[in-house]
Image (spheres, rainbow, N blue to C red):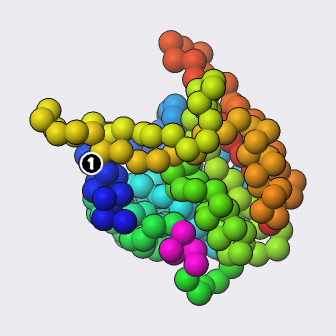
Amino acid sequence: MADTAIAWDTYSKQRPERRATNGRGETTWFNWTQYSDHGPGAELLGVQAGGLVLDVGCGKGGNAAHLAAIGMRAVGVDVSPQQLGAARERWGHTPGLELHQADAVSFLRQPGPQFDAVYSVYGAVWFSAPAELLPAIRERLRPGGQMVFSQRPPVEGCYGCQASYIPRGEDQDPAVVRRWDYEPDVWVSLLKEYGFTEVLARVLAAPPGPRTVGTLIVQAQA
């Protein structure tokens, strides 16, 4: 876990902070995509105020903070102390928000409550072995609970476990983490294999502009 935490600490230093407000002037908001003010929001989780939700790979905590701000009980888990430090500094005062440093699989395997939804935004679902993570999520979801995740669609021909490189200093080799890339129909099959139902996987097109890569969004029910 130490090497993984170092890699994501490095990544954290390279990422810009979330804006103070979004395009609608809101101080918290939910964003599934890599583009500002684009795509669906928290409604994909199907959870009402008071519901218990888990963000696996919460990063700097903006999405989890939004869910807490609208009345949910939001738990965020991340392996990176640097990311969690930024999350606590900006969002730690938010009632209903709870943050933990752990890798997602280890956290899910601990005894604890069942969640109304588990989600990942370019997070742990992308960077964890499905054979370990998916059954762990399934066990911690209440019956009918939702799993939703988003990530970049795979590059054509590059499927399964891939290497992701995080640049470091000029004289240092990049940090390397593993990610799992599948086409939408493969995600549907995998999730059904691990007991999920009502699985929907689609690629949301990018907004108008120079960048054309969409966002893969997958929804499933326990």
The quarter of the rendered structure image containing the C terminus is: bottom right
Residue 212 in picture, x, y percent from top left: 57, 18
Q: What secondary structure do most residues of the magenta stretch adopt? A: helix
- Give the x, y percent position of residue 193: 81, 58
Amino acid of disc 1: Thr
Write the start and end of the magenta stretch as one range.
105-109
Q: Which residue is mark 1?
A: 10
Residue farthest toward the bottom in the current orientation of the protein: 111
Compared to residue 203, the image places residue 7 above or below, namely below
In this rendering, does residue 171 appear at all? yes
User: Relative to 74, is 33 above or below?
Assistant: above
In the image: residue 188, left or right of residue 23: right
Q: Which quadrant of the view contains residue 197?
A: bottom right
Total residue callouts:
1
Nearer to me, 58 or 5: 5
Report whether 34 appears left or right of 130. left
Tell which residue pokes out farthest to the top in this image: 210
Q: Secondary structure at mark 1?
A: helix
Instruction: Answer whether residue 106 is magenta in the image.
Output: yes
- The residue that appears at 43% across and 63% down in the rendered structure is 78
The crowding category of the residue bearing disc 1, from other C-alpha atoms within 10 Å (few below 14, some 14 to 19, many at least 20), is: many
Front in this rendered view, residue 168 or 38: 168
Q: Residue 35 location in percent, x, y?
A: 52, 31
State whether residue 19 appears in this view.
no
Relative to 31, say whether 5 is above or below. below
- Residue 146 belongs to the span the image colors magenta: no
Q: Is the N terminus in the top left, top right, bottom left or bottom right quadrant?
A: bottom left
Q: Residue 200 occupies which quadrant of the picture?
A: top right
- What residue sits 22% from the left and 39% below the top? 173
Q: Residue furthest left?
A: 171
Q: Is residue 13 above or below residue 195?
A: above
Q: Residue at x 60, y 85 (%)?
A: 112
